[in-house]
Image (cartoon, rainbow, N blue to C red):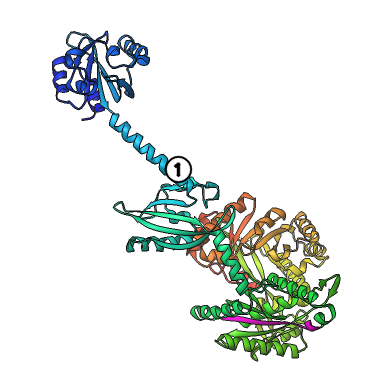
Amino acid sequence: MTANSIVNQLSKQFVTNDSLHQLFESVNSISVQGYDEQRRVVYWNKGSELLYGYKQEEALGKKLEELIVPAPMRDMVIEAHTKWINEGVAIPAAEILLKHKNGTDIYVYSSHAMFENEFKNKQMYCIDINLSDVKKAQAIATFKEQMLKTIFEAIPDLLFLMDYNGIIIDYHANNQDALYVSPDQFVGNNMLDILPKSVAKKFEVYIEKAIEQDEIVTFKYELSVPQGQVYFEARINKVLKYDQIMIIIRDITEQHQSEQLIRKQAYFDSLTQLPNRLLALDRLSQLTVEATRNDEKAAVFFLDLDDFKKINDSLGHEAGDKVLIETANRLQRALRKADTIGRLGGDEFIILSKGISTQQNAVGIAEKLLQNFREPFTIEGRELMLTISIGVAMFPDNGKSVSDLLRNADTAMYQAKALGRNTYSFFTNQMNTVIQRRLTIEEQMRGALQRNEFILYYQPQFDVKKNEIIGAEALLRWLNPVLGSVAPDEFIPIAEKTGVIISIGEFVIKESLSLLNRWKNVEQLNRNFSIAVNLSPSQFKDLSLFNFIKTSLSNANIEPQSLELEITEGVLMSGESSITDTLNDITNLGVILSMDDFGTGYSSLSYLRKYPFNVLKIDRGFINGITKNNEDYSLVEATIAMSHGLGLKVVAEGVETKEQLTILKELGCDLAQGYYFSKPIPEQDLIDFSIRFYS
């Protein structure tokens, strides 16, 4: 029975002194004293004799403050007792320091009860529990804690105490500013939830290994912290009998950097800092293994500077070195981070690209590389025009081994040299087919508008909340008597490059406005109908674009707000002031501006702040994923919330299922389009579809 429980029992009922004393006499481990209204001892149990050293006969009749209360506390004790007697202000239970008969200090936990005896006299009973052993244990624990603290402060390592499930019980860190997360996120949280997924997985594997093997396990990992990229070594060991583990983490960044320097000297070209031949071929070997495992294609590009020998001979090797360094920089700027660029030696370079699904993808990379060398090199105050020849070998079509791929790409490069340099060539004849088709597309595109080969299809857009058709997106189609149906993804890039896109874009706008004009004359149709038209980056280079839009709206007798212009990030990437002026002019005219394919670029958020958009279109890739994974769902949810916060309407592209539509409606999406409603259809089919919808 605890002191508090005894006090509670006494405070709830009145008992006689005899019954009360009988109760306390049975509890020798607890000191119980009774005092009258003048603080004189009326009861002193065996526990009090053991605790304070006074026999019962010595204590009876003595005042409380004369026996066990230290001198500095006496006035306070007398005042507190008097207030309780006279004013009913109870003395709270507390830890206090009292005196033994021999003068030594005694720490006790003291509780108090006040009640009347059978003679209506008030009596205060004190129930004291000896805390001296506890205080000694606390002192020892404090000493050990200070000792450990001193040791920990001398250790630069980070320590974690965790249970087997990864929950952090305690930690130690000398430099809290260098931690991956704030320290208040440690204790009580799972370490695997705090760390990045890749690092957490590594910890999970090695923790399980340490538990199973009953031995210390060691591994390395890296993290991005406020100070930059930091490298660590972790040691994990079990804490026996407690189902806990201790993890000691040491910063090995300096050691890692030293190792990296040695590795760099062995595997990287000292002039360009690119992977050297040894490392490049090793990565090519890895590329073939990975592509085989994933059943993917890959491309090997073999590059050689045209007439580089003339530069060395005429300007010297120092100028030649500067050309090679600038060449490496241009190659790096032209490619993805996932691609490997290496210097094989001299003026020969290699590029390894994985995830190449078709040869057409490789064509795009080769053309981008050639484009990057059309600007002159400025070397020692001189402008030099340099070109490259590129040979391409595809894995696995042109070889499955490193040697075969390298040899075939090299052969293809010499074929490019033979074709006149400043071009590319594939090792197989399949490339000739691609080139021939491209040339045929370019040839057939000339005059295609005049021959009325282009037609617009329209994909309806629906108001998600009202469930009504409010507009459509105009989509260009090309049916050529020689090529048949040519996909937009194939002919539009060629139209962009040849400049034909300007006249094609004007055709799309005119046809869309003509549909709007005819739409107004159909009684059954919604008058508040708009058409969304895509604008390409090349169209914005046309200084007459704004005047053309303004004139076309006037000629078609269409209100500006019925036309929506969709632009992608590519239009905005140059940051030219003329583009900003054109966008502002279009907005001031009343035309709706829409950011297309949102989420697929790099700086869309900054563009939303900088340019006067009215609508944001979420790319179909994210819509497809909202029913499959939490990441896409969260991104779509955040995009809708953010757009509404900026006063933008949101259009979801590629809606294909009722489940997707239901989620979009719950998230507050404004508009939707996709195969769930309708595939792109010709003008008359759109009108018929809309009439049926409203009938």
Amino acid type at image mark 1: Thr
Question: For this rendering, which residue is in front, 307 or 142?
Answer: 142
Question: For this rendering, which residue is in front, 358 or 376?
Answer: 376
Q: Image check: 68 left or right of 581?
A: left
**Residue that protrudes farthest toward the right in the picture:** 382
**At which x and y percent is residue 59?**
21, 13
**At which x and y percent is residue 224?**
56, 57
Q: Image check: 376 left or right of 178?
A: right
**At which x and y percent is residue 385?**
82, 77
Quadrant position of residue 548: bottom right
Point out the image quarter for the N terminus: top left
Q: Residue 471 in magenta?
A: no
What stretch of residues is rendered in magenta? 297-309
**At which x and y percent is residue 667?**
53, 54
Q: Which residue is mark 1?
A: 150
Asked whether the viewer can see residue 178, the reply is yes
Quadrant position of residue 191: bottom left
Instruction: Name the secondary structure under disc 1.
Output: helix
Q: Residue 308 in magenta?
A: yes
**Which residue lies at the image location 71% right of the left edge and 89% below the top edge?**
414
Q: Main secondary structure of the magenta part?
A: strand
Quadrant position of residue 554: bottom right
Q: Taking 463 as reference, is 121 above or below it?
A: above
Q: Image check: 606 left or right of 577?
A: left
Point out the image quarter for the C terminus: bottom right
